[in-house]
Amino acid sequence: MTPSAQTSPGTSALLVYFSRPGENYWEGGRRDLEVGNTKRLAQIIAERIVCDEFEILAADPYPEAYDPTVERNEREQNEDARPRIAGDLPDMSEYGSVLIGSPIWNMRTSMIMSTFVEAVDVAGKRILPFVTYAVSGMSDVDQDYRDALPDSDVADGLAVRGEDVDGAAAPVADWLRANDLL
């Protein structure tokens, strides 16, 4: 996946996500993932709907190791940072629905998601948040997006525990169906 979206004829949905492979929290310990949990969840979604995809890549990639990533995230949250995104952002004008996915880090989406939503124009669009998490569930992500995007229609999100992503086909289908995408 390249850090740019390609518009396909007949699509009006854009699937945007940020994910981090490498050492991740897993069942109380750690596990190395070649593909991050959120990207795996995005792949499940993309298999079920017609959509374009855009993977958010950090201009300064996050560490492969878990603990340094946690430390960096804490610094970014404390500083209200906006990490730079690699490459060009997609032209949002073609889309009516934007599915936005990220991991939950320390009870909220990673700060690069704030970078994204502040940099693109999604006014008037339906926003469908989805997250992967270790212990927090959806946290307040739906409301955070509603606060950040007052001119958008932010739907209730989908939260899938990282360890459960590979078995998430049924909840994904239910969520997509509830949002008239399936």
Image (tube, grey):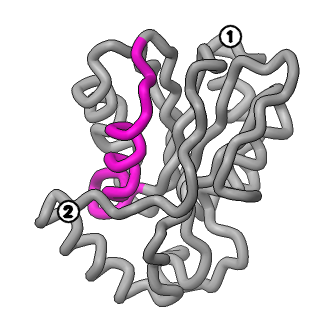
* Secondary element at image label 1: loop
Q: Residue furthest left?
A: 78
Q: Is residue 120 found inside the magenta-colored segment of the image?
A: yes
Left or right of 140 on screen, residue 50: right
Nearer the observer, 13 or 170: 13
Q: CA distance from mark 1 to mark 2?
A: 34 Å
**Residue 10 drawn above or below residue 77:** above
Q: Label 1 belongs to which residue?
A: 180
The residue shown at (66%, 31%) is 14
The magenta segment is 104-123
> 175 or 113, which is in the foreground?
113
Q: In which quadrant will I find the N terminus?
A: bottom right
Q: Sequence-wise, which precedes: disc 1 or disc 2?
A: 2
Asked whether residue 128 appears in the rendered view, the answer is yes
Vertical placement of 33 versus 175: above or below?
below
Q: Is residue 149 left or right of residue 66?
A: left
State whether residue 132 is above or below residue 163.
Answer: above
Label annotation for residue 111? none
User: Residue at point 59% right, 31% down?
Assistant: 91
**Residue 171: quarter of image:** top right
Image quarter hosting the C terminus: top right
Q: Is residue 78 left or right of residue 147?
A: left
Residue 34 lies in magenta, yes or no? no
Using residue 16 as the reference point, say whether residue 116 is left or right of it.
left
Please tell me how crowded label 1 is: few (under 14), some (14-19), or many (20+) other residues with Cα within 10 Å. Answer: few
Q: Residue 27 in the image: state x and y as whole percent.
A: 53, 74
Q: Which residue matches tag 2?
A: 77
Residue drawn at point x = 59 percent, y = 42 percent: 16
Which x, y percent locates residue 145? 33, 31
Query: What amino acid does circle 1 point to?
Result: Asp
Residue 45 visible to an observer of this rendering: no
Q: Position of residue 92 (x, y in %)?
A: 56, 27
